[in-house]
Image: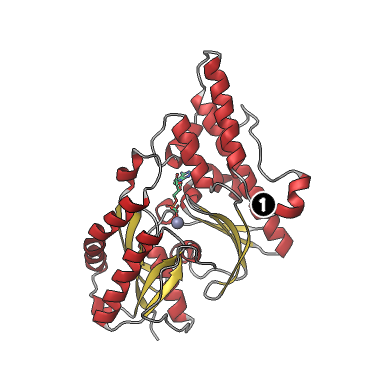
Amino acid sequence: MTEPLVLGIETSCDETGVGVVRGHTLLADALASSVDEHARFGGVVPEVASRAHLEAIVPTMERALKEAGVTLADVDAIAVTAGPGLAGALLVGVAAAKGYALAAEKPIYGVNHLAAHVAVDTLEHGPLPEPAIALLVSGGHSSLLEVDDLATGVTPLGATIDDAAGEAFDKVARLLGMPFPGGPPIDRAAREGDPGAIPFPRGLTAPKDLAAHRFDFSFSGLKTAVARWVEARERLGEPVPVADVAASFQEAVCDVLVTKAVDACRDRGIETLVIGGGVAANSRLRALAEERCARRGITVRAPRPKLCTDNGAMVAALGAHLVARGVAPSRLDLPADSAMPL
Ligand code: KG4
Ligand code: ZN
């Protein structure tokens, strides 16, 4: 079989994404975001996201097909994020995918959003060496995964026990008066600051925590520590050194993420680390992972920042992988599952 032509639909959060790939080649990545509508609330509002997906799904689909220079009749399969994510938002994508699959008589693949964040890297760097460790960090998730087989064998090693890493970036940015989403402005501000200026806590790294939470994360204590530190300065009437706070906070997050990811690679004897999710766009996280992994003979793979955040191409990439591996399609009555396990 020539490489499969697969269309992928993503609507699990605030991005309506439709991507088209042929095997590992990206042909189109159309995106409509409702992020500006959520900005004034400081976070994604589920009902607003669902309505925005409804309005955007058909035009985004048309844009992707046009950009790829194909018609729906040409594609071999339609993949769609079936979970995890916001229930109403997921339903829009799943219903649309079913409609298109039924109308064009195409097989449909309901895929896991987290596995798709890992799969997207194949569009940049080709097939993923298996096994690999995946560090998945976004606004909704912070997980370490062991990827024995991208199609059928992705196992969680650990996850956040409270806030996701991206959520921490968003909350700290708000505290510092920066816009939502907070990752990019913190990343920019941190470049002017001293990452060692303030010793913010590294969650779940103390020996007593490691016993039960070796590969888990916790960012809510860090967020509170930043809030307390800023409040204390304000109470004293002293200016808040925004760049230093941003850099020190970012360093605390990245230090923990990279330490635990490297530990997982060493524990499992695995030499490939793939980083995905919106926070994988962070410049310090990428640099620190490169630096620490190089010392230990671990290869780091991270897709270009645009592919790290939610998009349809990642869903298409996983769909193409499933088709190529001969995995059976989903049933046409597949449900959307907001808490879908891996
Ligand atoms: O993967 P994604 O687009 O959506 C979810 O599945 O959540 O991730 C969005 C998250 C947001 O919290 C945003 O602040 C964060 O990714 N983010 C970043 C950067 N770019 C986006 N965090 C840190 N540094 C960045 N450069
Ligand atoms: Zn995501």
* Residue 303 seen in the figure: yes
Q: Could you tell me residue 31's position as x and y percent?
A: 30, 57
- Left or right of residue 37, residue 153 in this image: right
Closest to the observer: 148 or 229?
A: 229
Q: Could you tell me residue 302's position as x and y percent?
A: 51, 56
Q: Could you tell me which residue is drawn at 68 percent across and 58 percent down? A: 264
- Left or right of residue 21, residue 130 in this image: right
Vertical side of 100 occupied by 304: above or below: above
Residue indicated by mark 1: 260
* Kind of residue indicated by mark 1: Lys
Q: Could you tell me residue 289's position as x and y percent?
A: 60, 49
Q: Could you tell me which residue is drawn at 74 percent across and 43 percent down? A: 206
Asked whether mark 1 and ligand 1 are closer than 8 Å, the reply comes as no
Q: Could you tell me residue 43's position as x and y percent?
A: 40, 43
Q: Residues within 10 Å of mark 1 (few under 14, many from 20)?
A: many
Closest to the observer: 8 or 37?
A: 37
- Left or right of residue 51, residue 184 in this image: right
Q: Residue furthest bottom?
A: 1
Q: Quadrant of the C terminus?
A: bottom right
Q: Could you tell me which residue is drawn at 41 percent across and 68 percent down? A: 336
Q: Could you tell me which residue is drawn at 23 percent across and 58 percent down? A: 55
Mark 1: which secondary structure? helix
| Residue 51 image-quadrant placement | bottom left
Vertical side of 222 occupied by 111: above or below: below
